[in-house]
């Protein structure tokens, strides 16, 4: 596929005058373009939902969620993966972001890394890929060899697979079981896919990781109840979550949190059911960490 023929590489008729605009006019045009992204992502929601369910299934089977990409796409995958442990209390390595060229490519482009299909394979082999893992390939163009190689190897290994690109009917879409292709159109700055394409990929990644965590019991109502309270701000947030979920006063929330080593989920169960910390932890373990199910069990 010729790069110049891709929608993401064509010129945007609405921004041909960027270099002659006032600053306010210029940023208004950027914003106008960004405003179209959510609608493009909305059209892919059935496929995003499939990816959420697939990711949750892999995690419940003891597998991992692995993002593979190059350049901006790779950086977005690493960003999403790095935010899962503090937000959802999952161990490092459960959600993995891999960028072509290795960690150094996060800060400085590694020329040629994205052009090597075998490098994508080697990076997955280094992770000791298992059939329980899910691999999500990211490439705005949809034609990055590194991602193609990784997805093909993952599929052949029996993994669940998804591809996220911003061009329709892309090569990586054909390599994955689930193809998510938000077509955001030409960029405001021709070919700069860190703009609308990057925003679209970030929106999709947000939904996949957050949705999968909801599905595996890391969320109660709309609260991140497995968040790790590792600093003063997060301790305060933990306390507020207990109050919000239970309607209790702050003093009671703080008392419960101290007894649970600041495990929000356990503290909420204590307050709502009246059980002690040990019993609350046991109930949660018996119900796979799902707070709603543990609460129902405690009321029987």
Image (cartoon, rainbow, N blue to C red):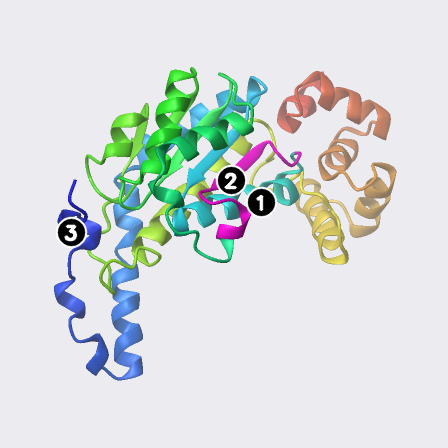
Ranked by sequence position, the earlier of labels 2 and 3 is 3
CA distance for labels 2 and 1: 8 Å
Q: Is residue 70 left or right of residue 16?
A: right
10 Å crowding of disc 1: few (<14), some (14-19), many (20+): some
10 Å crowding of disc 3: few (<14), some (14-19), many (20+): few
Residue 82, labelled with which disc?
Answer: 1
Q: Up-down: is 4 above or below 121?
A: below
Q: Which is in the foreground here, disc 2 or disc 1?
A: 2
CA distance for labels 3 and 1: 33 Å
Q: Up-down: is 249 above or below 124?
A: below
Circle 3 SS class:
helix
In reply to whether residue 92 is colored magenta, the answer given is yes
Residue beneath disc 2: 97
Residue 44, percent from left and from top: 28, 37
Q: Quadrant of residue 204?
A: top left
In reply to whether residue 79 is colored magenta, the answer given is no
Q: State the residue in front, 218 or 156.
A: 156
Residue 115, percent from left and from top: 33, 41
Quadrant where the image shows the N terminus: top left
Q: Which is in the foreground here, disc 2 or disc 3?
A: 3
Ranked by sequence position, the earlier of labels 2 and 1 is 1
Ranked by sequence position, the earlier of labels 3 and 1 is 3
Residue 291, percent from left and from top: 66, 28
| Pointers 3 and 1 in contact (C-beta within 8 Å) | no
- The stretch of residues the image draws in magenta is 91-105
* Residue at (76, 28) in percent of width and height: 273
Residue 262, percent from left and from top: 79, 42
Circle 2 SS class:
strand
| Pointers 2 and 1 in contact (C-beta within 8 Å) | yes
Q: Is residue 32 left or right of residue 111?
A: left
Residue beneath disc 3: 4
């Amino acid at each position: 596929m010729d790069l110049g023929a891709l929608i993401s590489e064509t010129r945007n008729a609405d921004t041909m005058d960027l270099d002659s605009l006032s600053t306010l006019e210029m940023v208004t045009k950027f914003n106008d373009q960004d405003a179209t992204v959510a609608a493009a992502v909305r059209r892919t929601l059935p496929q995003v939902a499939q990816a959420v369910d697939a990711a949750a299934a892999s995690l419940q089977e003891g597998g991992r969620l692995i993002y593979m990409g190059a350049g901006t796409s790779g950086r977005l995958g690493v960003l999403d993966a790095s935010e899962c442990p503090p937000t959802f209390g999952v161990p490092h390595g459960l959600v993995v972001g891999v960028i072509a060229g290795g960690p150094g490519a996060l800060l400085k482009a590694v020329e040629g890394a994205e052009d090597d299909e075998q490098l994508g394979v080697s990076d997955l082999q280094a992770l000791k890929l298992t059939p329980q893992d899910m691999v999500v390939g990211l490439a705005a163009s949809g034609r990055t060899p590194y991602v193609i190689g990784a997805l093909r190897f993952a599929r052949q290994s029996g993994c669940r697979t998804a591809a996220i690109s911003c061009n329709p009917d892309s090569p990586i879409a054909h390599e994955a079981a689930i193809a998510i292709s938000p077509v955001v159109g030409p960029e405001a700055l021709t070919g700069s896919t860190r703009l609308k394409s990057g925003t679209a990929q970030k929106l999709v990644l947000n939904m996949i990781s957050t949705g999968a965590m909801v599905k595996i019991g890391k969320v109660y109502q709309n609260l991140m109840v497995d968040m790790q309270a590792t600093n003063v701000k997060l301790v305060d947030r933990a306390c507020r979550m207990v109050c919000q979920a239970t309607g209790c006063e702050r003093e009671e929330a703080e008392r419960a949190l101290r007894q649970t080593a600041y495990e929000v989920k356990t503290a909420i169960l204590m307050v709502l059911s009246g059980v002690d910390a040990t019993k609350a932890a046991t109930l949660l373990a018996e119900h796979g960490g799902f707070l709603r199910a543990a609460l129902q069990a405690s009321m029987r």
